Amino acid sequence: MNGVKKITGTLPAIPVFLALGFVPLIVTAKKYTADLNHYNWFSDSKTFVDIFLYWKGQALILLAFIMLLILAGRYVFFPGKRHSAKISAINHGKKEVLPFFCLGAYLLLAVLSTIFSKYPSLSLWGSYEQWEGLNVVIAYGILFFYAYQIANSEKIVRLVIYSIIIGSFFLGLIGTFQFFRMDFFRSSIGMKIMNLMSGEKMSFSFNFSDGWVYATLYNPNYVGSYAALTLPISVAAAMIEWKKLPVFITVLSMISTCLLTITLLGSQSLTGCIGILAGLLFFFFYMFPVIKRKAGKEKMVGGIVGGIVCIGFLCFLFPQEIRSATDKLFRPKADYHLVKELSSTDRGLKVGTVKGDCFYVKVTGEEKNPFFVNDAAGGVIPLFYEKTKDYYTLSDKNFANFRLYPKKITVNGQRYPAVRIFNPTINKEWTLVKTKDSYMIYNAFHKLDVLRKIPQWGFEKNQHFGDKRGYIWSRTFPLLPQYLLIGSGPNTFTFIFPNDDYVGKTNMNYNGVPVTKPHNMYLQIWTQTGMLSLLAFLLLFILYFIDSIRLYYNRKNYSVLESFGVAFLVAVFSYMVTGLANDSTVAVAPVYWGMLGIGMAINRLVKTSQKYGKQG
């Protein structure tokens, strides 16, 4: 009997404990093949190495499978009404069931998007740069549902909270060492851990300079999303009275809060800072009646002043990191572009400029007169030849910053005449080949590709906004009407984004770099699983948000469980704010889905406590 009680007690919380605390810490290499070389905008490489995402996804899928087994075991071996009422949302009224209809709709639309996807295998299993296929998306849903079901006591909720605090401590510790240029993963031990699952000894290079924090999350941006989720929990645990939590957890929470703050600032994730600031403002206005009542005007003003002093102190300690982050939003780089359009026409190669001017180049392939140039009206533009450097300039002052280099290009054994267009002041260039029927781009991978007009909307003169998010969003918005019902399939954004936008990508220094994500969780969901799935995803959050707002507003006293209920609300809200400029990723999303399930479970426990408290 004691064994059975133990199994049905806290042990079922272990999968959630691991999903929220351990999975984000996994860093080990996976060598894989991806058959993407048939795309003209992709390299001929077939073998790649992932260090931060693949095994996180596999661990989550394994844990989700264990969760399903535990749930099945519970319903088989404990089918009684009493137990069922204890763990099932269905017995808590229609309002409690609605979030699970939202979850079901979201997952169903993800499944349909995969079934009807042009890339079903990639959509199902995930691949290059993301590893967030349908298998991982379903694991998110299982984690959310399971977390809600098993969190049927304050003891289990506390265990899950401890996992978040412990996990964030270790991640913050790794990030802090990275900030002080002592990156664990650049050490010999770190290299061995990264090779743990590879089956061979590989050496690794790092995309981020020494001192730039990425922790265990692949990208500094994801550090911001993770901090937005975990900082409110560690702060809440640190501020709750010592007697109400184990001293070890309280001290660890304080240390974790400091480490996460350093890690966040070291990541230079403006999105994370904005998310946390939004969470703080939300907390202040939401809890204002309580703060005013308990602290009084003098202490409240003192707290505000203290907060401003802390922010100023952080700005003093980390001036470079904060300046770099804020510049991305408030002082983005100017769009110093010259070329706006390259297209093949009957008049020749059309070169359109950002000022609205254009000229046409006819490549002849002849040695003496390799090309002729005409203006928009058809008039001839004389060319001046720079013999020592073998290039031509245009006599028209509107095109003074253009140089035309005659070239011969060999592709697949066939030789073509070509022109290299170069803008010396901004160091941008394109090589265009004259084939039998048209002009084609010769790209960074030494492949020929057709020139096509790329749809774009918005951010016309501000494409560097948010560290080039303006450019990516301007090319993503036109895709949205195609995916109202279902999307292109999970993990397929790389293939629907116009990665053949050779003009735009070169202007943004993305030449030869495939864009794999929209840097916006909501655009990501819309394009990959459809607008309807995005609405289901948002409604799931909104239902939790409204329920929590009503439950915790202006209470006289807050128990430990209710305090964490507010902390989970702030954390989930902050994460949703970061989603405006960050993507969903298997490095962080499991923490969100698990916390959302636990947050809803806390609300259920608080309601039950309030109900029986009133009856008593």
Image: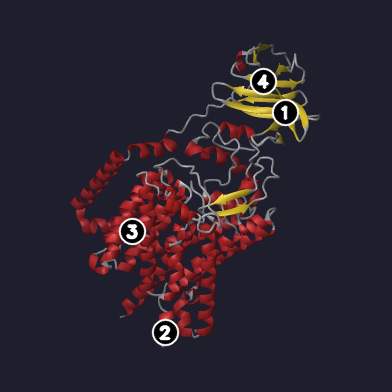
As drawn, the label of residue 234 is 3
The percent position of residue 287, horizontal first and vertical second, equals: 31, 57
Q: Secondary structure at mark 1?
A: strand
Q: CA distance from mark 3 to mark 4?
A: 60 Å
What's the CA distance linking mark 2 and mark 4? 80 Å
Image point (40%, 39%), residue name: 325
Q: Earlier in the sequence, mark 3 or mark 1?
A: 3
User: What amino acid is labelled 4 in the image?
Assistant: Tyr
Q: CA distance from mark 1 to mark 2?
A: 75 Å
The three-letter code of the residue at mark 2 reads: Gly
- The kind of residue on which mark 1 rests is Ile
Q: Kindly tell me whether residue 530 is visible in this rendering.
A: no
Q: In the rendered image, which residue does mark 1 sit on?
A: 409
Q: Amino acid at mark 3?
A: Ser
Q: Quadrant of residue 324?
A: top left
Q: Indicate left or right for 44 with 604 as reference.
A: right
Residue 98 position within the rendered picture, expressed as x and y whole percent measured from the top left: 52, 67
What residue is disc 2 on? Answer: 3
